[in-house]
Amino acid sequence: MSTPNNFDFDNLWSEKSTNAERVIVNHAKYDFAIAYPPFEAVPMYGLIDGLKAKVDADLEKVSIEMAYYPHVQGDESLREFTANKLYGDRGIKTEKDSIVLCNGSGEANGLIIQALINPGDYVITEQYVYMGTTKQLAYYDANIVGSPMDEQGLIPDKLEDTILNIKDKHDVIPKMLYTIPEHQNPTGSTLPKSRRIEIINICHKYGIPILEDDCYIDNRFEGSPEPAFASLDNSGMVIYVGTFSKLIAPGLRMGYFTASPEVIDRALSVKPGSGPNQFTAYAIDGFLRSNLQTHKNTYDKILKDKKEAMEKGLLEAFSDTNAKWSSPQGGCYTWFEMTDGTNISEVRNEVFNRGVGYIAGDMFAPNGDGHNMARLCFAFEPVEKNYEGIIELASIFNDLNVI
Ligand SMILES: Cc1ncc(COP(=O)(O)O)c(C=O)c1O
């Protein structure tokens, strides 16, 4: 049936709605721009077996649950698993009733933003930060201020300066600190424990809650994790967000947050409808209860090999240039940086057309800095392409007189 498309909506749109750009993902031959995990590690049959195990264990129970709308906090068994995992992996004392499963951690971040942020409120983030969250903050008309970071993440003294600057200029205390402390997106940095403690003290001093986005915690392939903010503070100031997207697959759309009961109540008040997809929850729960460690071992090895292949390319092709890059012990990203004044942002499209995709640094900076920087995702392309693509990138940069 053809759509006539002649009804006039022009005077009817809400103030908040705009024309969305339908995202068409164009992949470069060597795609380092995306934020996907290795597709070869997605445990499709493991998930199907997990789902079947749950059905076989109690057909009547799951059928009844499926016939209802899910609990607003999501499947109870997966919440219990998540609470135990958070205690075991992150030392966070929580329980199933304090876990809210969401449609990805993106929804979890969005609920917290809606529960706390009024138009015009100030929110501090890292100097370079995941744009999915800054987009949500911008949608709720927050003023986003990036606080200086180095290769270890946020710098506590500078964070206090950022708070005081906002206070002096605007006579307000920022509403929230949003941080990705482990294998940060985009820089790959991990914040040491000592800095986390300093930041907690600073945030207490000014009464600023911390939204800790621990999205990449399950992707550590070397070294040991730093303690979560949420395990270092028991005042309820820290709201902790996690996801199954980076441990298993984003297509599942399953993330979560845990927070104090009062924060949960406020966040649920802005959540429309029921909890996330029950069918997916069964598959994740059934799969992870018997396969978490084996899956993680396979996955970590793949990520490590891929990171090393990209690093080999970087060492070979960029050692004699002024470029430097981070060497994260986990996550999906390497942060690539050239000397100040070099502009790898303006050549991005040309480099893409010639076969190599990356996201330039300014896309992650609330103040638009970072033209000399780029996020390179090592998680998606096969090992050989990670190496080849970087050699190709250097050759394109050479052609374009960037190096
Ligand atoms: C830091 C961070 N937080 C949240 C998300 C959203 O993930 P999801 O909604 O798939 O859990 C991403 C996705 O890349 C991310 O990098």
Image: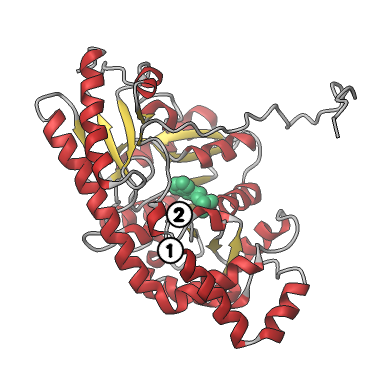
Query: In x, y percent, where is residue 83?
Result: 49, 74
Instruction: Say which residue appears at 48% left-offset and 73% top-offset.
Output: 287
Residue at 37 percent across and 41 percent down: it is: 160
Q: Residue furthest right?
A: 7
Q: Quadrant of the N terminus?
A: top right
For this orientation, the residue located farthest to the left is 320
Residue 385 placed where, x, y %?
27, 40
Judging depth in this view, the residue of 125 and 205 nearest the camera is 125
The residue located at (29%, 60%) in the rendering is 300
Label 2 Cα crowd, 10 Å radius (few <14 / some 14-19 / many 20+)? many
Q: On the picture, is 69 further left or further right than 10? A: left
The residue carrying mark 1 is 230
Residue 389, compared with residue 71, is above or below; it is above
Give the SS element for disc 1.
helix
Q: Position of residue 244 (x, y in %)?
A: 48, 61
Pick out the residue farthest to the front.
Answer: 1
Residue 188, compared with residue 292, is above or below; it is above
Could you tell me if residue 206 is visible in this image? no
Estimate how packed mark 1 is, as few (under 14), some (14 to 19) or many (20 or more) residues with alpha carbons within 10 Å.
Answer: many
Q: In terms of image quadrants, where is residue 230?
A: bottom left
Above/below status of 292 relative to 393? below
Asked whether the beta carbons under mark 1 and mark 2 sit within 8 Å of each other, the answer is yes
Q: Is mark 1 within 8 Å of ligand 1?
A: no
Q: In whole angstroms, how far apart are the C-alphas of marks 1 and 2?
A: 8 Å
Please name whichever residue, 281 or 234, is drawn nearer the observer in this view of the structure: 281
Residue that carries the numbered disc 2 in the rendered image: 212
Q: Amino acid at mark 1?
A: Ala
Q: Quadrant of the C terminus?
A: top left
Q: Earlier in the sequence, mark 1 or mark 2?
A: 2
